[in-house]
Image (cartoon, helix red, strand yellow):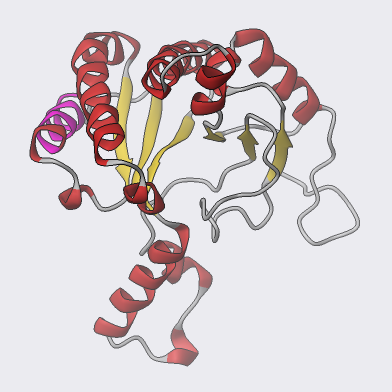
Amino acid sequence: MPPLTHLAIIMDGNGRWARARGLERSAGHKAGTETAREIVRECRKLGIPFLTLYTFSKENWSRPKQEIGFLFNLLKDFLSEELPSLLEQSIRLNVLGELDELPLPTRQVLRHAMDKTATCTAMTLNLALNYSGRHEILRACQALLKSRVKPEELTEEMFAAELYTASMPDPDLILRTSGELRLSNYLLFQSAYSELYFTDVAWPDFHAPELHAALAEYASRQRRFGTTGEKIA
């Protein structure tokens, strides 16, 4: 079985889940939050060191203001409620993205949760918030230009150190729910050799059994890193 140190998830399908049930989109987002809670706890039980959830992309700002406001209030309430559990499980909270552009109340709750969990060591939970893979790459390039790194001196390791995921392993598995077959600007540099798993199950219905099915599929694969053979650990 290939090792799995970093699982990244594109949580898709909240709106379609709600529409199929004749509900408002807000009901889908709320149900999706409960699924996130369940999956975080399950990954912690399984001993997965890094979990990254695609929570809000830069493109999501184009959604109706009312929906955006609901999403950030939902996130704020979720973090406030879940903080004791994160501490109990020794889960460190981290944000990938432009935190300073988020609403002030959300920023305050996020920073409080990150400060409180900073010394937790069992697992790192990354929330990709106000995140864009292309912007992340552009941001890294700008930082390297400012540091006046010579082109011939630049390495992949130096570039990776300027990404939000600096010092973290690349995702071993990227999982997307609700039937879409694309990465949607998610961890573009880091996903070069990630295994991909797509399921038609909408995020609110993606429970522990679905997670175990995805991990079982991953376990059956032989990972290749640009060679004809399996990478030797």
Residue 118, percent from left and from top: 22, 31
Quarter location, residue 125 = top left
Kindly identify the residue that appears in the image at 51 percent across and 13 percent down: 22
As displayed, is residue 95 above or below residue 164? above
Q: Quadrant of the N terminus?
A: top right
Q: Nearer the viewer, residue 130 or 228?
A: 130
Kindly identify the residue that appears in the image at 39 percent across and 18 percent down: 33
Q: Nearer the viewer, residue 137 or 5?
A: 137
Secondary structure that dominates the magenta span: helix
Q: Quadrant of the C terminus?
A: top right
Q: Is residue 9 magenta?
A: no
Kindly identify the residue that appears in the image at 64 percent across and 18 percent down: 211
Residue 150, percent from left and from top: 39, 91
**Relative side of 106 to 143, left or right:** left
Residue 74, percent from left and from top: 26, 22
**Relative side of 49 to 232, left or right:** left
Residue 75, percent from left and from top: 27, 25
Q: Which residues are magenta?
A: 107-116
Quarter location, residue 126 = top left
Kindly identify the residue that appears in the image at 59 percent across and 13 percent down: 205
Q: Nearer the viewer, residue 4 or 65?
A: 65
Q: Is residue 113 magenta?
A: yes
